[in-house]
Structures are given as structure tokens and as C-alpha cells.
Image: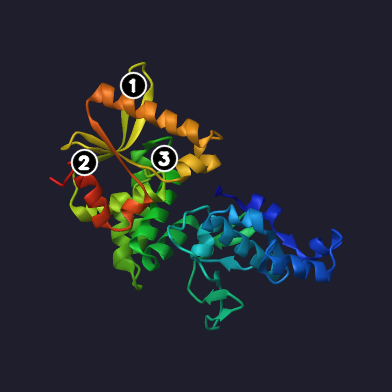
Amino acid sequence: MRRTINIAQASVLLRSREDMLHSGLSERGLHALVASGAFIRVRRGWYVDAVEWKQLWIEGQHLLHVLAAARSAGGRGPVFYGVSAAVVLGLPLYRLTPKNVHILIFGRRHGRTVSNIAQHNVEVRSEDIIEVDGIRCTSLDRTVLDLACSLSPEAALSIADAALRRVAVSGQQQDPDLAAQWHDRLGERAAVLRVRGIRQARDLLSFADGRAQLPGESVSRLHLRRLGFTDIDLQTQVMGPAGEVYWMDFAFRGARSFGEFDGKGKYLDPDLAGGREAGAVVLEEKAREDAVRGVTGWGVVRWGSAHIRTAGDLGSRLASFGIRPC
């Protein structure tokens, strides 16, 4: 069962060579644990239990790499950049598996990659360097801008949506004023940049919407735009027969249907499932869907990660339920 972690939780999982030896292990015993696969060597001198490692999403695994790099550096540590800054900030990495930890370097040195640390000599304003639980990284706005230029549209939009959600959304409702301020601020910064990928960044930043709760919803929305859908609403509120409130991911007004992205995390991730067993979540979802159908007369179509690999896949799924662009 995969789970998410923050910096404090990563600090508990990450164990130094000295910690391992002080616990009674010998050097030979430590090497044997790594050789057997019982422990993962995250970085020279830093380890994590393999069972714990396998339970983490990619974001958590990369966060451990980042934390190990920070502790190895000593002092204040480096300033993490790009996808490494993203995991420090708690942003999602949609279908990304970083091979290196990314940091900033300053001065006239040229960027290079050494021991799986990619160095980037890029200009960053001092106010765009922040500290999160003792780890320095680029700010939320700067990280979103950098990755909007460099990642795939799917991964970049997932990050932009998550960032906007953090600053403008409470529950399922987005504050229009806060969202407008975010769009204006990021738009102004993007307007003066002349870097590779900035055209994509400007488009995705203007399209960002914090109401997307999961990367799968962000990617679904991007595919829906590619398919030509214009008559959709996000996070539509439906009142149940007993006055209960339900929120539906997508509403296709022309087809009188609701759409729901069903990621596995909804049923298996303890944080998303609220500690409930998967079976209980499934039953609650069924009761919710029955109630929504009953009070609205609208249909409900669900799709998962396999249906959003391409826009065509999602289009085929929706078309099988009679939902097509107007």
C-alpha cells in the first residue's frame, strides 16, 4: 500500500551509517543487509528499510534522496531546484522518476552532474529561495515556473494545479480572488521570461485550476481540452436526498452526465481513504453514486489511470458512454 510522506517523516525513515553501526551492526552486517535487499542505500552513508521504501510513492522516494543529499552536504545544505524542490514543497510528480537530485550552484561555475547530483547555474532571486523544515529550495512560484517550462504538459499542469490549490482552494471551492491573484502573479513573471519552453508554461499556467484534487484530474482536464470539450464544470455540488453534499469531479452539461476520475489512491492510500478499508470506500462510493443519479437523473461515468494515458484513450472511454464534445 503506497503512502505519502513529508520531511519530518522522511527524517525518521532515513538512517545514517553511524546510526546503523551504533545500533550494534558491524560493517559486514550493514553490507549484508544492503546486499540482501533488506535495506536500500539511498546515498553513500544513508540508508532506508526496503519495506518502508517500497511503500512510498515516487515523491517520497525522491524526497529521501533529497534529504540524504542535504545531510551529506552539511551546513545549511544546497538549494534544491526543479523536481527536487517540488518534493520538498509537497508537489506531485506525475509519471516522473527522477534519476538525479537537482541543486542550484552560484557564481561562474558550469553546471554538471556528480554522484547523481545535477548542478544548475541559473539566476534565481534571493526572495525565491526559501527554507522548508530546514531544507532550502526554490519558492513555490519559482518552482512552478521552472517546471512548467521543462516538464511534459501533463506533469507540469499537475504541479501548477496543486500549487494553485494550496493558495486558493478550501475544500472543493476555489476563491476566485485568490486564484486571480495567483494567475496574475505567475502570468506577469512568465510574460517577461525568454527561456526554452516558456510558451508552453504560459499556456499551462493560464489553464491551471486548483479544484483538481489529484494529478489524474489535472491530466483528465488537459485531455478533455485536447478533445474539444468546452461544456464541462469542475467540482459540481450535488445535494443528496437527505441533504448530504456531494462533489462531482466533472459535469458534462450537454450529455447530462458526471465524470469521476478514480485513482487507486482513493481506495488504497491511507491519507486519501481517511483510514477506511478499501471495501468500505467502495461501498460509500456506490451509495454516493446512487444518490447522485437519483436526485439529478444524470449518468455517472468513471475512469482511471489506464484511460488517461492519451487523449484518445479518454475520448474512447467517454464515447462508450455517449459523451462527446459538442
Residue 242 pos. (x, y %) = 36, 16
Evaluate if marks 3 and 1 touch, with contact meaning CB atoms under 8 Å apart: no
Picture coordinates of residue 4, whole percent (x, y) = 56, 49
Q: Position of residue 147 (x, y in %)?
A: 42, 63
Identify the mark at residue 55; answer none if there is no mark: none
Residue beneath label 3, please? Answer: 169
**180 to the left or right of 108:** left
| Sequence-first tag of 3 and 2 | 3
- Looking at the picture, tell me which residue is in the foreground, 76 or 107: 76
Amino acid on which disc 2 is placed: Phe
Pick out the residue farthest to the top. 242
Which structural element holds mark 2? Answer: loop
What is the spatial separation of the Cα atoms under label 2 and label 1, in whole angstroms? 23 Å
Considering only vertical position in the picture, is 234 above or below 85? above
Circle 1: residue type: Gly
**119, above or below 56, in the image:** below
Q: Is residue 116 visible?
A: yes
Q: Which mark is residue 321?
A: 2
Foreground residue, 253 or 189?
253
- Where is mark 1, residue-wise? 240
Q: CA distance from mark 3 to mark 2?
A: 31 Å
The local secondary structure at tag 3 comes to strand
Residue at 70%, 62% in the rendered image? 39
**Closer to the camera: disc 3 or disc 1?**
1
- CA distance separating discs 3 and 1: 23 Å
Residue displayed at 39% across by 59% down:
155
Task: Tell whether 56 sits left or right of 19.
Answer: left
